[in-house]
Amino acid sequence: MIPDQPGPATPSAADKFDDENYPGYTMGRAADMLGTTQGFLRSLDEAGLITPQRSAGGHRRYSRHQLRLAARARELVDKGTPIDAACRIITLEDQLHEARRRNTELHVGD
């Protein structure tokens, strides 16, 4: 007899809370958390900084990672940086952070 094979691993609901890319926040909740308007979040989508996922009903859903990017955008815009420039700065900062993380991973075993 062949023993039962475990099925494909599916993340539990608790695992989703730890996933920074899980789209767990509605637009209204995200705007409240950031202290901004829903229009500001839509403008970040239009500028290409964040692309929220959509619920089955078509509503925007944001991840924690996207909320961090939006908070940084708000910081820059509040200091007078035009939104397009703020989005470009944040994109470059995010790419630099990822490159540094990957570089560290590659050199851990050296």
Image (cartoon, grey):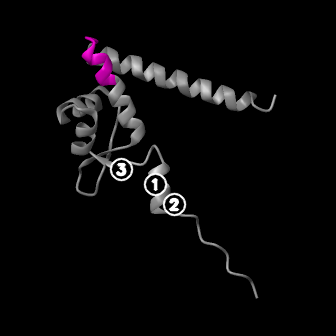
Which of pointers 3 and 1 lies earlier in the amino acid sequence? 1
Q: Amino acid at mark 1?
A: Lys
In the displayed structure, does residue 7 sit left or right of residue 21?
right
Q: How many marks?
A: 3
Residue, disc 1: 16
Q: Is residue 49 visible?
A: no
In the image, what residue occupies the spot 42% across and 37% down? 65
- The span from disc 2 to disc 1 (Cα, nearest Å) is 7 Å
Q: Residues within 10 Å of mark 1 (few under 14, many from 20)?
A: few
- Give the residues in magenta: 73-81
Q: Which mark is residue 11?
A: 2
Q: Amino acid at mark 2?
A: Pro
Q: Amino acid at mark 3?
A: Gly
Between 17 and 21, the one nearer to me in the picture: 17
Q: Which mark is residue 88?
A: none
In the image, is residue 54 above or below residue 86?
Answer: below
In the image, is residue 13 above or below residue 22?
Answer: below
* Residue 62 within the segment the image draws in magenta: no
